């Protein structure tokens, strides 16, 4: 592949694609997670300064195709990507990973944002949050009848009635069963990321008959080409380049 690509990452799919691309590709990370140092493509870390900054970067670097493989809840960068591609006059292709779908016996409840989540959690005592860092800012507001467990990328000290577990997926089914058993949680909080790497917790919730509160997916922009599967995107790339 020889066209100059800018790959916006932050997901396992993006890293897998980056591993297949050569030095003509720039692989861009926000810098919150691990930065790989064993790739053939160039890695850059940090923001661009909004859509306009990204558009300037695209022009300055001679980027011919923008690839958005960011997380489905990273809505800002996806909107910036669509806008910047339009300004710079290059196509933007995106991987739009489908969300999980409930099966028989699932009790999934969708919530819109933090306040709605806290209201929906009121009847429960031991929530397990697997929805990122947002609960960490609210550990001093834990209702008196609740004990929270927050699983996110990095552990940190927690006040009484809270535990913060640092862990990175993928999570195996057996590990998840053991975690739920240890915590005795009565409700799971999650984004609907649609990733196989974090799906086993939903199976454990199903096995235990636990409700799952899912933060609603953000709206993402429409771009030139959208793919549900990484393999389809890769095939289209090979045909395009
Ligand atoms: P966000 O709210 O959509 O983006 C915030 C800002 O971070 C963007 O405006 C941009 O800064 C910068 N940014 C985001 N992704 C970038 C990338 N790939 N390369 C360069 N700059 C980037 O994103 P977020 O929710 O904070 O997520 C940050 C990163 O973590 C994303 O790359 C995402 O794929 C990954 N991630 C997010 C989640 C999640 O649940 N949100 C989960 C797993 C992984 P400028 O405006 O300065 O360009």
Image (cartoon, helix red, strand yellow):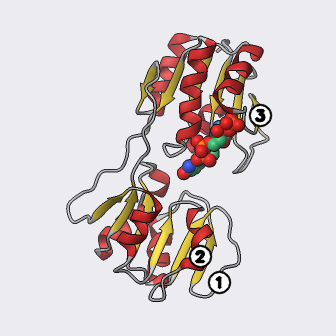
Observer-side mark, 1 or 3, equals 1
Compare residues 137 and 61 and report the one nearer the observer. 137
Residue 20 shows in the view: no
**Where is mark 2, residue-wise?**
139
Which residue is painted at 50% across and 46% down in the image? Answer: 73
The disc at residue 44 is: 3
Lower sequence index among marks 1 and 3: 3
Mark 1 → mark 3, Cα distance in angstroms:
36 Å
Ligand 1 lies under 8 Å from the Cβ of mark 3: yes
Say whether disc 3 or disc 2 marks the residue closer to the N-terminus: 3
Quadrant housing residue 135? bottom right
**Residue wearing tag 1:** 159
Residue under the point 50% across and 84% down: 147
Q: Residues within 10 Å of mark 3 (few under 14, many from 20)?
A: some
Tell me if label 2 and label 1 are in contact, CB under 8 Å: yes
Viewer-proximal residue among 219 and 21: 219
Camera-side residue of 129 and 105:
129
Residue in the picture at 53% in, 43% down: 71
């Amino acid at each position: 592949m020889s066209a100059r690509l800018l790959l916006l990452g932050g997901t396992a799919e993006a890293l897998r694609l980056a591993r297949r691309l050569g030095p003509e590709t720039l692989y861009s990370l926000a810098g919150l997670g691990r930065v790989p140092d064993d790739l053939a493509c160039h890695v850059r870390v940090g923001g661009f300064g909004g859509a306009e900054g990204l558009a300037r970067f695209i022009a300055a670097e001679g980027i011919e195709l923008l690839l958005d493989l960011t997380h489905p809840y990273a809505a800002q960068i996806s909107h910036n990507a669509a806008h910047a591609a339009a300004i710079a006059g290059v196509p933007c292709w995106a991987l739009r990973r489908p969300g999980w779908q409930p099966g028989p016996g699932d009790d999934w409840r969708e919530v819109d944002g933090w306040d709605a989540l806290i209201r929906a959690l009121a009847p429960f005592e031991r929530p397990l949050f697997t929805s990122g860092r947002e609960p960490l800012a609210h550990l001093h507001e834990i209702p008196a009848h609740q004990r929270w467990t927050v699983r996110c990328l990095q552990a940190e000290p927690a006040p009484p009635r809270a535990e913060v577990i640092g862990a990175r997926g993928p999570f195996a089914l057996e590990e998840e069963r053991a975690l739920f058993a240890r915590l005795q949680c009565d409700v799971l909080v999650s984004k609907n990321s649609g990733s196989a790497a974090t799906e086993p917790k939903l199976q454990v919730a199903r096995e235990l008959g636990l409700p799952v509160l899912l933060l609603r997916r953000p709206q993402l922009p429409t771009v030139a080409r959208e793919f549900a599967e990484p393999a389809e995107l890769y095939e289209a790339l090979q045909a395009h380049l």
